[in-house]
Image (cartoon, grey):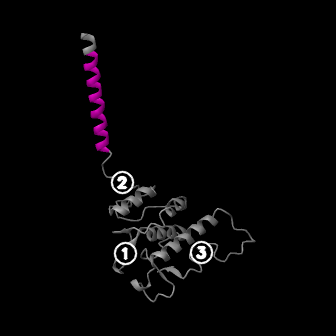
Amino acid sequence: MKTLCNKLHIFGQTMLLVFFTLSVLSLGSCSKETLDYNHPDVGLFVKQLKAGKYSTQSPDGLSNMPKFTSEDIEELLKYAEDLTAIPAFPLAPVSYSAGGKLRLGECILWTVETIRLGNNASMGCKMVHTDAENYEGIYFLSDEEVLDAASRYRRWWETRKYPRTMWTIDPCYDEPLCGSGYMWW
């Protein structure tokens, strides 16, 4: 009987140690997640944007766009139709001063366009109509138009899977917004 009590006591202590270890590990996982500037994770980037806690820095210490590449486009496009309003996006202040809400999907499309071009698509992550005279809210796209732009970018990306040949006739082959009436300012 005494050995059984000793075994139960040892088992209880072991379980207490396991519980304590798991508790410490779970508390450690609640720490702030940091986005790697040179090798960013799309999911973490989106999570931080939605929470208003975007927190990556370039090697210079500035809060910049992480270095996404064409390998990230497919993952980025998964969020292109998300019209959630986000509090901030890592761009020039003109993005915010022009008015209108920042929509996650539209800013994700800006990120994709920036990858496509190899430089910033525009000074802000809001598209405007092609007849826009300036960067005012009256020229910004509606939610439905942003969804249309997202489908155009998705279609553009899908055509990238097939190489362009001398028989490719599509004049919009490498222009996602071609014929849409939308543009980046």
Q: Count residues near mark 3 (Cα–Cα under 10 Å), then give few for <14, some for 14-19, many for 20+.
A: some
- x%, y% of residue 57? 36, 60
Residue located 30% across and 48% down the image: 30
Cα–Cα span, label 2 and label 3: 34 Å
The answer to whether 130 is drawn above or below residue 14 in the figure is below
In front of the other: label 2 or label 1? 1
Tell me the kind of residue under disc 3.
Glu
In primary-sequence order, the first of circles 2 and 1 is 2
In primary-sequence order, the first of circles 2 and 3 is 2
Q: Count residues near mark 1 (Cα–Cα under 10 Å), then give few for <14, some for 14-19, many for 20+.
A: some
Tell me the kind of residue under disc 2.
Thr
- Residue 137 can be seen, yes or no: yes
Cα–Cα span, label 2 and label 1: 26 Å
In primary-sequence order, the first of circles 1 and 3 is 1
Q: Is residue 184 left or right of residue 62?
A: right
Q: Count residues near mark 2 (Cα–Cα under 10 Å), then give few for <14, some for 14-19, many for 20+.
A: some
Residue, disc 3: 175
Q: Is residue 117 left or right of residue 6?
A: right
Q: Which residues are magenta?
A: 6-28
Residue located 36% across and 54% down the image: 34
In front of the other: label 1 or label 3? 1
Residue, disc 2: 34
SS of the residue at dot 1?
A: loop
- x%, y% of residue 119? 49, 71
Q: Is residue 44 left or right of residue 177?
A: left
- Residue 40 can be seen, yes or no: no
Q: Are marks 1 and 3 in contact (CB under 8 Å)?
A: no
Find the residue positioned furthest to the right: 167
Is residue 132 rendered magenta in the image?
no
Residue, disc 1: 101
- x%, y% of residue 166? 75, 71
Is residue 18 rendered magenta in the image?
yes
